[in-house]
Image: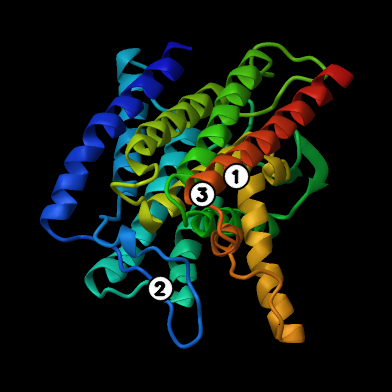
Amino acid sequence: MIQVVLAALVALAVTLFGTPLLIALLRRHGYSQAIRVSKDGIQYPEHQGKKGTPSMGGLAIIIAVVLGYAVAHLAVWRPPTVSGLLCLYLMVGLGLVGMADDYLKIFKQRSTGVRARTKLVGQASVALSFAVMSLYFPDEFGRTPASQAISFIRDTPIVLPMVLAVLWIWLLITATTNAVNLTDGLDGLAAGASVATFAAFALLGVWQFGQNCSFSRFERCYEVRDPLDLAVFAAACGAACVGFLWWNTSPARIFMGDTGSLAIGGAIAALAIFSQTELLLVAWGGLFLLTTLSVILQVGSYKLTGKRIFRMAPLHHHFELKGWGEVTIVTRFWILQGLFVGAGLTLFYAEWVRT
């Protein structure tokens, strides 16, 4: 448990006190993101007040998580696990893909960043390599970090062949990262929502560690390979988001950019895959799913009927155009995410109580 607390404290300190240094550095070099403006009959929310705000703040989150995780292991002189290292690999790898996107937004002043196809190729390269590696490196009980079975609250009887398992993991990662990316449209929205998700995974990891099959085999023990290290990683991620949120809440002094949103999405996906709660991502990332569905419905409706369901997608921009204040939208969406995560924890614990 000391590792979980230590990882959280270090990550919190790094983003809380290190983010202002990053803000100053980015401002000095003029690294601010382009802001979309209404034109050609297309109306966007009025965000000109955000012009000049530096982006690429996700760097602070990634550095904080890496340092928090490293210090937590050095302090107790315990080597990192394969699961923990793979979580870091996915988070950092996707963060680098996001940095390429932020680069174009900042230096080319192109608000759309990297073309969607190029971004997907970059994400796929990282996600597929992660998927393959996660199905190797068995421990003394023969358990690999990820399982070939589709999981809900634990692994289900549906076991996929190796190739399909890799594609399934890639699909989960792609869906989660893009969902977080779509949600990152208002000050503090994605970072605050992610805090609840990471807190749930930290609790989950500690619980699965206490009831793990490594210590004693009984009917409902958990076959998760490295649950305590997953809790350490989740605690570092959650605390890093809390520290970053201090500077990212409205009016934001820095945006996380795709560097942060893709990294956070990757971390959430990795935790769900390794904790064997893949389908429970519907609850862990309920707000992210809701945001993504709003985009899918908007595009689908326009292509099929020529009419839009929302004034603008993603959903939070619809409420902006309806006149809701930014802080009101963010606060209410945080509440929604808290309810989603609470429902996920309830389902998880109910399965244990029932048995």
3D distance between C-alphas at marks 3 and 2: 19 Å
Callouts 2 and 1 close, C-beta under 8 Å: no
What residue appears at the point 29 percent right and 71 percent down from the top-left corner? 104
The residue pinned by badge 2 equals 112
Q: Which of the marked residues, 3 or 2, is nearer the chain's N terminus?
A: 2
Seen from the viewer's position, the closer of residues 19 and 167 is 19
**48 above or below 339?**
below
Q: Which of the marked residues, 2 or 1, is nearer the chain's N terminus?
A: 2
The amino acid beneath tag 2 is Thr
Q: Give percent across and percent down for residue 129.
A: 48, 56
Callouts 3 and 2 close, C-beta under 8 Å: no
The residue pinned by badge 3 equals 265
Judge from the rendering whether residue 185 lies leftward or rightward of residue 174; answer left or right: left
The amino acid beneath tag 3 is Gly
Checking the image for residue 308, the label placed there is: none
Q: Determine if residue 136 is in view.
A: no
**50 above or below 242?**
below
3D distance between C-alphas at marks 2 and 1: 24 Å
Name the residue at the left extreme. 28
